[in-house]
Image (cartoon, coloured by chain):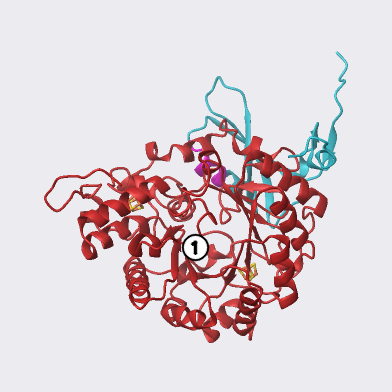
Chain colours: A red, B cyan
Amino acid sequence: MISVSKLLCGLAAAGDGLRYDDPSGPDQITEQRQRKPVVVWNTTKGCNLYCEHCYAGAETEPATGELSTAEGKRLINELAAFGVPVVLFSGGEPLVRDDVTELVGHAADRGIRPVLSTNGTLLTRERARDLRDAGLAYAGVSVDGLPETNDAFRGEEGAFDAAVDGIEACLDAGLKTGLRYTVTERTVDDMPGVIDLLHDVGVDRFCFYHLDYGGRGAAVQDADLTPAARRRVVRRLCDLTREYHADGAEIETLLVGNYADAAFLVEYAREELGATAARRVYEYLRRNGGDPAGERVADIDYRGDVHLTQFWQGYALSNVRDRPFGRIWTDTANPLLSRLRTREDHLSGKCADCCYRDVCRGGSPLRALAVHGDPFAPDPQCYLTDAERQRDVPPADGNGVSEPAD
Amino acid sequence: MADMRERTRVERSSGDGREWETFVRQDPDSSLRHVGSVTAGSEGVAYEQAATLFGDAADIWLCPAEDMCRYAERPLCDRIEDAADA
Ligand code: SF4
Ligand code: SF4
């Protein structure tokens, strides 16, 4: 998760601490907690919608074997004991479970920051208030395009309006609420319009996800952007963010799921803001650490399987019914887990000598696996030019003299 | 020696496709190790997936998850009542 607004506009992101891999997070969360992953918990496989790109492969009927309320609470206790800072309640659609508010409350009681990822269509005012009272810290609502595009993608007419109603319900309840938007060929053109429309509704946090190649997302790879188009949209988002800020609207914009963006942001800063700013951006991103799979993010699915990211459902490390999460996560006898955590040493192809590997780490191992059959091969979504990959980093000052990072 | 430890049988519900418990022997003289599970519709695809994830292992063994019997000393259902909560 890369905060464009924070990096380019120096905004003290209001989302501090929501995700510790957010560059604005580390100041807020203790060293100890920083090393622990944000956990995405797919509480259910059931969903009231049927989207084409669903990484969880959600179905309209919940699957058997979901963790029960009691199991969920015990899981939360174990996550708290392990020091997990944030649990993202996801699905499927988490709000199809009627115990979600109870589980959110339990996480908050145990000192975990509970956040929600939802399609928004089931968020009534009453539900939003209950979630707020239970201690929910943030609701991320998925919208993928303006009404026509979104509803076609989500497989339901009226889904856009229902999601906006849900967003309004959250904002009325005083819940911090943001947009989740997956950028594909089909949704890319609607992006500025959606920011505009939701900004009018009162949303000020906008997260843009690159498509990962897991679940049904793997089947819609063809709808993914070309590298050139991806570069254009990231540049557009950088420009837009700066324009909003110049107009006094301090929106928070974030990019998720493709760490070539980190390299691009340094390039963008160098071009638009100068070498000193670029160096500052680079240092921030280097501390942030690049792609988080298997390290700063973990996923637990509805039946307790532990995955390396929420998108990587085709491989499980183990199951929390067998073994506590902390033991699974620290068991580096697993060769894949240990290689992911030292992946700088295993990157191949153009990533092996890329000057940005400290801020990117080769991008998404899942996309590399899906396309090249090797998680340590270059991310097929990388859009950096050869010249950019061979630069001097960190960027030196204009006169060639490096200054200490601040 | 008699086994004095108590274990509970753990059920693992299957997901979408078939789950394959995966074991690798990293070097010819090391022991076989459980390294998780892959989802695949057939043995051939399961093997391919395991081989891309654990390509440098000497041996790879796969077993359909539904054919595994799992007995754990401290499964989650028993941990629920644990007094030593966080
Ligand atoms: S992407 Fe979200 S809303 Fe769409 S089917 Fe999957 S869980 Fe449901
Ligand atoms: S070449 Fe590899 S490490 Fe460099 S930016 Fe692209 S994906 Fe990242």
- Quarter where residue A126 is shown: bottom right
Can residue A139 be found in the magenta stretch? no
Per the image, the residue denoted by label 1 is: A14
Q: Is residue A398 above or below residue B11?
A: below
Viewer-closest of B40 and A394: A394
Left or right, residue A228 beside residue B1: left
Is residue A233 left or right of A386 when viewed as pictured?
right
Q: Nearer the viewer, residue A374 or A359?
A: A359
Q: Which chain does tag 1 point to?
A: A
Residue B52 covered by magenta stretch: yes
Q: Is residue B22 visible?
A: no
Q: Secondary structure at mark 1?
A: loop
Residue drawn at x 62%, y 79% as measured from the top left: A168
Give x and y (percent) for residue A1: 46, 57
Query: Which span is picked out in magenta?
Result: B48-55
Q: Is residue A386 rendered to the left or right of residue A136?
A: left
The residue positioned 51% from the left and 61% from the top of the image is: A15
Q: Amino acid at mark 1?
A: Ala
Q: Is residue B47 visible?
A: yes
Q: Against B29, is A371 above or below?
A: below
Task: State the image coordinates of residue B76 (x, y, percent, origin top left).
Answer: 79, 41
